[in-house]
């Protein structure tokens, strides 16, 4: 480990785990961050001010408060959201998260990021997102089902196979999507598999969907490493988050010869400079609910993981992980954003000045929405593809999108995030302009 002191912008040494005294407080509201990112792209594109104003706001926001009967007979009222940011390029698309920390601004930001993400990989969707304020870890299976079905009934005025197609996100999974599909189908009187994606294969889900986001991150990592002259075999990876995204990426990286030196989940993490036994960790996580019971490395916190000396850092947990507070201690050569919004704009600028190669979330984790698009198409046709075909089609789309963004970055001499936004925002702006404003 490098023991050289980290310096603040004024040149003063910073103790590990501390914040430089002259570091200003930053706004980490995700919606404000999304607006700032849009502002930067709009200025660069010289976007019409009126059009910029249109793109700043979600088209629809639904807030619902709904009762759920708990296992003990009591009734609790939960709050949920569904936000559609923009549908100029097609039906709204975006996940549903169950989290005690979600709020309207987070959902707004996630919906906006979905709009740009779909445009960057050039699939015909607009952006949406949903959420329920709850901690799914404290709810029983039957309570989660009743909550999901009631929430679905409340947002059914917005969702539909041609209007708004939800998917899993933090705290939700394939079973959640099956409940949503069934509830919607019961209300309309016939089975509608295309109303959600990320379902079990047995009820219209797509082969390859559960691994899609993690696998897509690996496809992007291979391109990023190649661009930076680093061999994948033996390359060191640190992954923050060991859920469906982080654990899948870790598994595939381990299989193709990369060295995953650190991983963490909500309970904590493990670090081994020689590489961790990822298959054993995945088995432990499934069996025990956490990787910590396995061992095989030194204990490490999620924050410490971010600051490791590594070739590639994959923040795949939640937003606002790399901020002004810790950006001066980030030592990775490459950052691939598996989570949505893990880096604040102020930290982004510092990473760029230091020459860190960062692949933004709107490109890096787009594998999930690409295969969601495939699932939706298969459901509409009632014709399904083999997993190998799904993975090949996803790889082709993601690599094309990566190279488009890389070419834009080189051409305009900008970082990868701004390059991605220049592509995504322009495509949405062009679609909005071509369609015009009704009436």
Image (spheres, grey):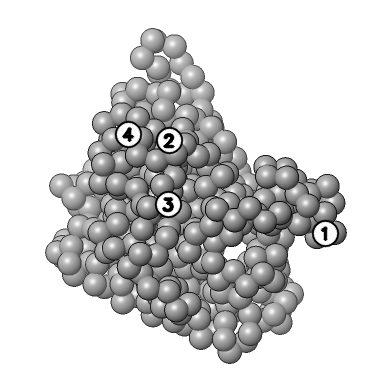
Number of dots carrying numbers: 4
Residue bearing the label numbered 2: 151
Q: Secondary structure at mark 1?
A: loop
Real-space CA distance between mark 3 and mark 4, rounded to the nearest whole angstrom: 17 Å
Q: Residues within 10 Å of mark 1 (few under 14, many from 20)?
A: few
Judge by depth and name the residue closer to the eye, 229 or 205.
229
Report how far apart the C-alphas of labels 2 and 3 lie in the structure: 45 Å
* Residue identified by numbered label 3: 273
Q: Read off the residue under disc 4.
A: 294
Asked which secondary structure carries label 4, the reply is loop
Residue 217, placed above or below residue 428: above
Q: Earlier along the polypeptide chain: callout 2 or callout 3?
A: 2
Q: At x 82% / y 54%, what residue is drawn? A: 12
User: Could you classify mark 3 by the number of other residues whose Cα lies within 10 Å: few (under 14), some (14-19), or many (20 or more)?
Assistant: some
What is the spatial separation of the Cα atoms under label 1 and label 3, in whole angstroms? 30 Å
What percent of the width, then of the height, locates residue 284?
A: 28, 35
Counting other residues with Cα less than 10 Å from the Cα at mark 4, is it few (<14), some (14-19), or many (20 or more)?
A: some
Residue 388 percent across, percent down from the top left: 17, 67
Dividing the picture into quadrants, the one containing residue 365 is bottom left
Single out the mark in the foreground, 3 or 4.
Answer: 3
Q: Position of residue 172 (x, y in %)?
A: 38, 40
């Amino acid at each position: 480990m490098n023991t050289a002191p980290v310096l603040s912008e004024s040149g003063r040494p910073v103790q590990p785990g501390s914040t430089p005294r002259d570091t200003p407080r930053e706004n980490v509201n995700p919606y404000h961050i999304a607006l700032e990112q849009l502002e930067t792209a709009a200025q660069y594109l010289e976007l019409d001010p009126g059009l910029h104003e249109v793109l700043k706001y979600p088209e629809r926001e639904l807030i619902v408060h709904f009762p759920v009967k708990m296992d003990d007979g009591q009734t609790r009222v939960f709050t949920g959201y569904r936000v559609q940011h923009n549908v100029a390029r097609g039906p709204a698309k975006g996940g549903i998260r169950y989290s005690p920390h979600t709020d309207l601004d987070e959902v707004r930001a996630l919906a906006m990021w979905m709009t740009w993400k779909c445009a960057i990989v050039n699939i015909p969707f607009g952006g949406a997102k949903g959420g329920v304020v709850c901690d799914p870890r404290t709810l029983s299976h039957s309570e989660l089902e009743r909550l999901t079905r009631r929430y679905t009934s409340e947002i059914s005025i917005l969702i539909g196979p041609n209007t708004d197609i939800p998917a899993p996100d933090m705290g939700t999974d394939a079973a959640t999507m099956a409940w949503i599909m069934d509830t919607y189908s019961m209300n309309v009187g016939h089975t509608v598999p295309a109303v959600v994606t990320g379902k079990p294969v047995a009820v219209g889900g797509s082969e390859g969907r559960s691994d899609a986001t993690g696998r897509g991150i690996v496809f992007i990592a291979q391109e990023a490493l190649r661009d930076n002259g680093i061999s994948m075999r033996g390359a060191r990876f640190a992954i923050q988050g060991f859920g469906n995204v982080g654990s899948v990426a870790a598994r595939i990286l381990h299989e193709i010869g990369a060295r995953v030196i650190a991983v963490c989940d909500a309970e904590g993490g493990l670090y081994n400079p020689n590489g961790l036994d990822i298959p054993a960790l995945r088995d432990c996580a499934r069996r025990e609910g956490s990787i910590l019971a396995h061992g095989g490395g030194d204990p490490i916190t999620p924050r410490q993981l971010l600051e490791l000396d590594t070739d590639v850092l994959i923040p795949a947990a939640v937003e606002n992980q790399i901020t002004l507070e810790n950006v001066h201690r980030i030592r990775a050569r490459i950052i691939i954003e598996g989570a949505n919004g893990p880096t604040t704009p102020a930290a982004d600028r510092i990473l760029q000045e230091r020459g860190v190669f960062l692949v933004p979330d709107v490109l890096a984790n787009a594998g999930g929405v690409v295969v969601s698009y495939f699932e939706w198409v298969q459901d509409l046709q009632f014709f399904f593809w083999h997993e190998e075909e799904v993975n090949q089609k996803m790889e082709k789309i993601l690599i094309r999108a990566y190279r488009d963004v890389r070419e834009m970055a080189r051409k305009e001499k900008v970082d990868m995030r701004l390059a991605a936004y220049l592509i995504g925002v322009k495509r949405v702006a062009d679609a909005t302009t071509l369609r015009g404003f009704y009436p």
